Amino acid sequence: MATAAANNQKKISYRAKEVTKCPVCATTHFKEELLSGSGRLIAGKLTQELQRLYEDNKKWGKINPLVYHVQVCPKCLFAAFPKDFTTLTSEEILALKNTVAHRQKVVETFFGKYDMGENRSIVHGAIAYMLNVDCYHLRGPASAPTPKKAVSAIRAAWLLDDLFKEANYRPYDKLRDFYYVEAARYYKRVLDTMTSGIEPMEESAYILGPSLDFNWAFDGVIYLNSYLTRKFIDQMATNPKDKYAIMDSSRRYLSKLYGSGKSSKSRPSVIIDMAKELYDEMGKMMERFRIEYDPAFAEQKAKEAAEAAAIVAAAQKA
């Protein structure tokens, strides 16, 4: 009895009463949900990636709510955000049926055989978001797959980073960086789809997050596009001219956020302050890239530096 009571006290999740039938393979399962309340989650700081960290809980242990937000069929490994799980077209179902072996191979390559029907750990969460990216590749524009791939990629990177910190003998750091770069590319595409109207953005507004405690919405998309571009520009392009062009495009979007200069309930000052700092950092990087590929600009900057140094030297002699 005492053991049962102790196990109940440590319970952090439950299974939904309603059964879910996979639209791809017809397997049934009960979705796992995170229990709320009772001080299970202790919010920590917000990172520069707009990631909400959570402190270790002495009573409940380490809990990351992101782990529970992708629904996965335990048999065919079809994954989607819950709202999209049962809304497949016949073409999407066929594409997902034809790629079951691929999804199984992805999981086994990096994690071995994992039962996605078990209660979730950080490993299950990382796998779920990796599968989510793969499955939204096969979804049509009506489900707004591009922003969902962007959010899934950065969340996969966060969880893989947690795994690397816990067990750095596995290649989680390389896999983490792969998903960070994927996120950088997807966030750029989100901005493109926003301006072109290719995908219905209202279908993804609810999951933009990228964390769960606050939805930064399209301000977050603009900011993360620039932040990830700055951080992973060397992986996104190989020559300075291309790096300059990519960063210039991202920085132009960022100027709309930074240039607004007004905070509000939906746009807290923290994101404006981070955008300003990022805008300045990107400007300095762009100048270095241009010096590398533009001889005339490099000569001009060298001349300005020499003149500035002469002024300082003259002032020191006076």
Image: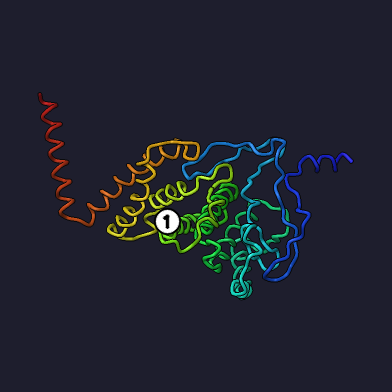
Q: Farthest residue to the right: give it.
A: 1
Badge 1 amino acid: Leu
Its colouring scheme is: rainbow
Q: Which residue is mark 1?
A: 191
Residue 227 higher or lower than 193, as above or below: above
Q: Position of residue 113 (x, y in %)?
A: 67, 64
Q: Is residue 118 depicted above or below 99 in this figure?
A: above
Residue appearing at x 43%, y 47% in the figure: 223
Q: Quadrant of the C terminus?
A: top left
Spot occupied by residue 46 in the image (x, y as percentages of width and height): 52, 39
Mark yes or no: residue 245 visible: yes
Mark 1 falls on what kind of element? helix
Q: Left of 301 or right of it: where is 186?
A: right
**Left or right of 16, for residue 281:** left
Please identify the quadrant where the N terminus is shown. top right
- Residue at 75% over, 58% down: 30
Q: Of 270 and 154, which appears nearest the observer? A: 270
> Does residue 101 show up?
no
- The residue at 62%/74% (across/down) is 90
Q: Say which quarter of the image contains residue 94.
A: bottom right
- Mark 1 Cα-neighbour bin, 10 Å: few <14, some 14–19, many ≥20: some
Percent position of residue 69, x then y: 63, 52
- Left or right: where does residue 81 sit relative to residue 59? left
Give the residue furthest to the top.
318
Number of marks drawn = 1
* Residue pictured at 60% horizontal, 47% vertical: 166
Among the 4 quarters of the image, the one containing residue 275: top left
